[in-house]
Amino acid sequence: MTAVDYRTQTTLITGASAGLGAEFARQLAARGSGLVLVARRRERLEELAAELREKHRIQVHVVEMDLAADHPGQALAARVDLLGLHVTSLINNAGFATFGPFHQEDPERLRREIAVDVTAVADISRAFIDQLRAAGSGVLVNVASVAAYQPNPRMALYGATKAFVLSLTEALWEESRGTGLRVLALSPGATRTEFFDVVGTTQAAGGTRLASPVDVVRTALAALDRRNPPPSVIAGRMNRVMAFVARRLATRRQVVRTIGRLTAEGA
């Protein structure tokens, strides 16, 4: 495949107000991509947009939106059309988790978790994938998680949503072969972002060392830079080892009991 020239791209990034979304924006801006930054916190988006415009002299547009609302893909596509933009690359990064026994979680918070982590990813991907494929030179990155590779007691729903994202994205990778669109599922482990502020505890990391957002995004972009990009990539050597063990060497009983013990320590 031909290398992506990000100077010709307009990249839409969800969850762009902080964490991996903001870091994707910074690294793609450094490569010359125009940006559409999407999140609920407009003030944070405007601050980031101003920083990137001044530093890289690129076009940056801001869209304030709650992706838990109905039909986020259709609504987002309409907002982009009003701005007169044509999106050629997409980073579905928005997401959040809950931590605790499933039967004790607030049903409304679980509904929002499904809406943002599952429905919005599928809906936004569908809303834009035709034009991404037609452009034939961009990327579609869906942020999954190393949690996608095994059951996750006390983060049961989050792990399930990320397993969905991983499976969906790898299927889209195959469906998009030959179009020029590079499709990638990125699976970070625990990362130094606001993720744990939203969850309410760093114990959700299971005692693992927190990775740098800079390194996680570099891992994704390096995978996309390959001549034949893979359908998915796991950020961090230890995370890759753990995923391999979970899928190839241990029984499902062993895996779920081990993860259960790790998360129980913080419960």
Image: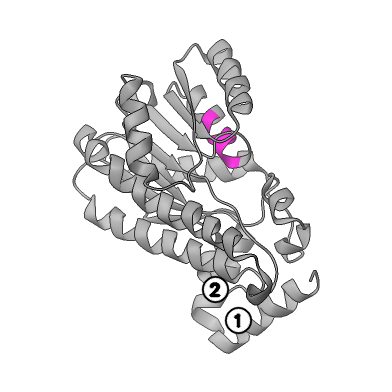
Dividing the picture into quarters, in which one does residue 89 lie? top left
Q: Nearer the viewer, residue 59 or 76?
A: 76
Mark 2 is on which residue type? Answer: Gln
Viewer can see residue 119: yes
Q: Secondary structure at mark 1?
A: helix
From this view, report whether residue 25 is shown above or below residue 98: above
Distance in Å between CA atoms under marks 2 and 1? 7 Å
Magenta stretch contains residue 9: no
Mark 2 touches mark 1? (CB < 8 Å): yes
Dividing the picture into quarters, in which one does residue 110 lie? bottom right
Instruction: Return the residue at label 1.
Output: 255
From this view, report whether residue 36 is shown above or below residue 178: above
User: Tag 1 or tag 2, which sits nearer the N-term?
Assistant: 2
Q: Secondary structure at mark 2?
A: loop
Image quadrant in which the C terminus is located? bottom right
Q: Is residue 142 left or right of residue 181?
A: right
- Give the image location of residue 208, x and y in percent: 73, 61
Residue 150, which numbered label? 2
Magenta segment, which residues? 20-25
Q: Is residue 197 left or right of residue 6?
A: right
From this view, report whether residue 180 is shown above or below residue 144: above
Q: Is residue 222 left or right of residue 134?
A: right
Residue drawn where x is 43% and y is 61% of the image: 166
Mark 1 is on which residue type? Answer: Val
Magenta stretch contains residue 24: yes
- Give the image location of residue 134, x and y in percent: 19, 36
Viewer can see residue 8: no
Residue drawn where x is 49% and y is 63% of the image: 161
- Give the image location of residue 12, x and y in percent: 42, 33
Q: Main secondary structure of the magenta part?
A: helix
